[in-house]
Image: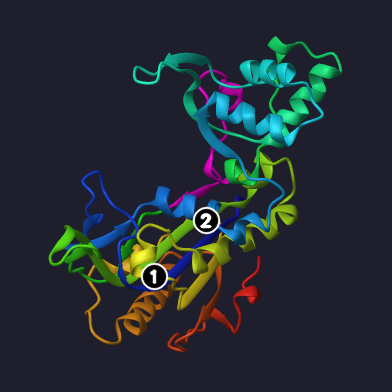
């Protein structure tokens, strides 16, 4: 039977704009008939992948890029003992197709992979060792290497080498506010210190505030399969992801809003299926001074109803900084490090 770890966090952000759409406006979604502020799953996953918490827990992070020459320069820097021509030949044969483009303004020619893909210096070094040991360059595309944890979690699709495709072990939802969101507009000026009066620039930016529900589900068996390990072996990275969902926030506009907040409520459940609790907030929580506490109560109540009505095989452990949650179905702990599976 497949094992899933479901991660649920409630995190309150004051004025912020961590995720924008193509028009530079606050991302939103209509849920339960009301407008909510939204942070996309792609935005949150990148923030986690780039965080110190995640970086300190893994041996290596992948590099997502389509810039062939920049990746080559990085590999040459990381492997000074290796012939640069050999590194180049390996990159030409290990990744997606490479094409050359000439910049019309500068006249310089640069090379690009035909798609943005994750690459790992460690995997490239391993491929170089194979070539030095006698493997032909053209055979590199057929060799499937163990992916980094971020690729094992988020997946990879490589049309040029289907054998390298990795099914994502982690599903991440777009974060939504548990209540209706009021999108506000900040009118700002950039003062010119050398001007006698007026401003050098006048502009506007949207922002909002609220309690966000974050949810993700990790297929433990698939994650272990992706990295060719056991379920026990991947437990530390799962615990790291739980911590990241509680502590990591996107960096956009943080220099002007400083919404560096951590979750007030963190719950992880172990079950035989994915289980989102977003519908606890289909009816918007009343946006009063106790919106976090009411959101926690709604989440816990919805979890109890689902596990009872569907007779789900699910165990839960939670950290509640507000001391609001009281449930026989949930084990409460005092520290984030106590949430372990």
Precedes in sequence: disc 2 or disc 1: 2
What residue lies at 44% left-to-right and 55% top-to-bottom?
44
Which of the 4 image quadrants contains residue 82?
top right
Which of the 4 image quadrants contains residue 227?
top right
Quadrant for the C terminus in the image: bottom right
Question: Is 9 situated left or right of 230 in this image?
Answer: left
Secondary structure of the residue carrying tag 1 is loop
Q: Quick check: is 51 in the magenta stretch?
A: no
Secondary structure of the residue carrying tag 2 is helix
- Residue 102: image x %, image y %? 41, 15
The residue that disc 2 covers is: 48
Between 48 and 2, the one nearer to me in the picture: 48
- Residue 282: image x %, image y %? 25, 66
Q: Is residue 157 visible?
A: no
- Residue 278: image x %, image y %? 34, 63
What residue lies at 53% left-to-right and 76% top-to-bottom?
318
The residue that disc 1 covers is: 258
- Magenta region: 153-172
Q: Is residue 214 visible?
A: yes
Residue 160: give its label.
none
What residue lies at 75% left-to-right and 24% top-to-bottom?
127
Query: Overall secondary structure of the magenta stretch?
Result: loop
- Residue 1: image x %, image y %? 62, 50
What residue lies at 51% left-to-right and 61% top-to-bottom?
6
């Amino acid at each position: 039977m497949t094992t899933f770890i479901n991660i649920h966090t409630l995190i309150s952000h004051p004025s912020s704009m961590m995720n924008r759409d193509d028009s530079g406006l606050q991302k939103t979604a209509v849920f339960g008939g009301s407008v909510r502020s939204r942070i996309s799953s792609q935005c949150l996953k990148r923030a986690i992948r780039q965080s110190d918490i995640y970086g300190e827990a893994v041996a290596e992070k992948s590099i997502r890029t389509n810039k062939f020459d920049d990746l080559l320069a990085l590999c040459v820097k990381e492997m000074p003992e290796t012939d640069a021509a050999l590194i180049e030949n390996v990159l030409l044969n290990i990744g997606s197709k490479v094409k050359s483009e000439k910049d019309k303004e500068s006249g310089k020619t640069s090379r690009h992979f035909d798609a943005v893909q994750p690459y790992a210096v460690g995997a490239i070094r391993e491929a170089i060792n194979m070539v030095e040991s006698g493997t032909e360059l053209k055979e590199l595309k057929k060799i499937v290497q163990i992916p980094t944890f971020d690729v094992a979690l988020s997946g990879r699709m490589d049309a040029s080498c289907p054998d390298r495709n990795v099914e994502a072990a982690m599903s991440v939802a777009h974060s939504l506010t548990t209540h209706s969101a009021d999108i506000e507009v900040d009118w700002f000026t950039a003062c010119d210190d050398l001007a006698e009066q007026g401003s050098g620039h006048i502009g506007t930016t949207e922002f909002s505030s609220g309690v966000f529900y974050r949810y993700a589900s990790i297929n433990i068996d698939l994650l272990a399969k992706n990295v060719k390990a056991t379920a026990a072996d991947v437990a530390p990275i799962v615990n790291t992801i739980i911590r990241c969902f509680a502590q990591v926030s996107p960096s956009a506009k943080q220099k002007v809003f400083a919404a560096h907040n951590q979750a007030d409520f963190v719950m992880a459940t172990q079950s035989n299926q994915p289980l989102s609790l977003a519908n606890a907030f289909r009816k918007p929580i009343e946006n009063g001074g106790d919106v976090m506490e009411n959101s926690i109560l709604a989440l816990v109540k919805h979890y109890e109803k689902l596990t009872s009505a569907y007779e789900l095989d699910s165990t839960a452990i939670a950290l509640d900084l507000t001391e609001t949650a009281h449930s026989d179905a949930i084990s409460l702990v005092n520290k984030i490090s106590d949430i372990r599976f």
